[in-house]
Image: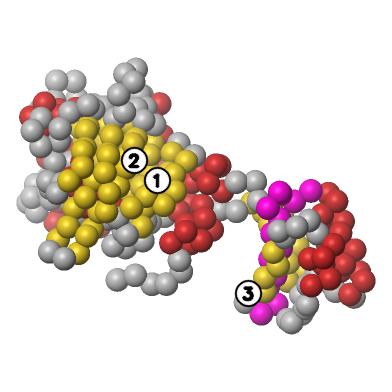
Amino acid sequence: MSDVPAVQISGLVKSYGTKEAVAGLTMRAARGQVTAVLGPNGAGKTTTVEICEGYRRADAGSVRILGLDPVADARALRPRVGVMPQSGGIPATARAGEYLAVMSRFYARPVDPAGLLARVGLAESARKPYRRLSGGQQQRLSLAAAIVGRPELVFLDEPTAGLDPQARHATWDLIAGLRESGATVLLTTHYLEEAEHLADHVVIIDHGALVAEGAPAELTGSAGQLRFRAEPGLDPAGLLAALPPGAIAKESPAGAYLIELSGGMDPRAVATITAWFAEQGVLARDLRIESRTLEDVFLELTGRELRS
């Protein structure tokens, strides 16, 4: 496997008028891995991916896709890269099976289109025109079109948006299969569970710049959380004094409590917490120990306010 990353972005800048959509972004996607690019609405994800796909030009910085320039070397990259846009771009009258068969003819070693159509659950809809497919079916046809040519690198923009749980998990299996075959996947998604389940590497961007990156386990860390429910308004000051430095206790919403230890939850800490329950006469309900999720990390880094 080449040492050259599948995607290498250095100091990328892109503005629209006075708005800077991407502000000096540097990131990479290693070959043979699933890299998830996460960020709130307006963070610069779509612009970054469109520049990588060669649909937009950068104002400054460097972008290399499989070691090549996505604009100058577009013809050389086309048979090596698969693209699944969030909106299909498939002709409304094209029949699903015929469209995928036509797409397969552009590649030297395509996947069998009929078999791929079955893998994405569209075998019975092969003769339906695109406009008569449901939103989820259109999404799955776009995914099939992106991978029918056995690409080395696949860009997937919200691949499970609008899918039901069964179709979402089937898509996850398909993406995992791409990685197992040696392909690289660059994934953008708003489903944090999806990124945590699929990604080898996660990149979080906000306001057009990198704010964090790493494997999901590296980002979530070893911080232990203990959650419980009890009567509202408990004062955990005495409990915090007995726990290691850096412990945090929160009540939100009323009656729902979170205790977090930076060094991780261990038997001694649990014993201290339950002893405090007994001293205070607190009957804790729904007591459970959890690890931080990628969603916890994402909200800590990018905030909880709504974005347009």
Quarter holding the C terminus? Answer: bottom left
Circle 3: residue type: Ser
Question: Disc 2 designates what residue?
Answer: 27
Q: Is residue 189 left or right of residue 264?
A: left
Task: Give residue 107's mark.
Answer: none
Q: Secondary structure at mark 3?
A: loop
Circle 2: residue type: Met
The mark nearer the N terminus, 2 or 3, is 2
* Rendered view: 79 above or below 127: above
Label 3 to label 1: alpha-carbon separation: 29 Å
- Report the front residue among 157 and 62: 62
Label 2 to label 1: alpha-carbon separation: 8 Å
Q: Residue at x 84, y 71 (%)?
A: 238
Question: Disc 3 designates what residue?
Answer: 252
Question: Disc 1 designates what residue?
Answer: 203
Residue 48, given in percent of the width and then of the height, sits at: 24, 48
Question: What are the residue bounds of the magenta stretch?
Answer: 254-266
Q: Secondary structure at mark 2?
A: strand
Q: Give the residue furthest to the bottom.
A: 233
Circle 1: residue type: Val
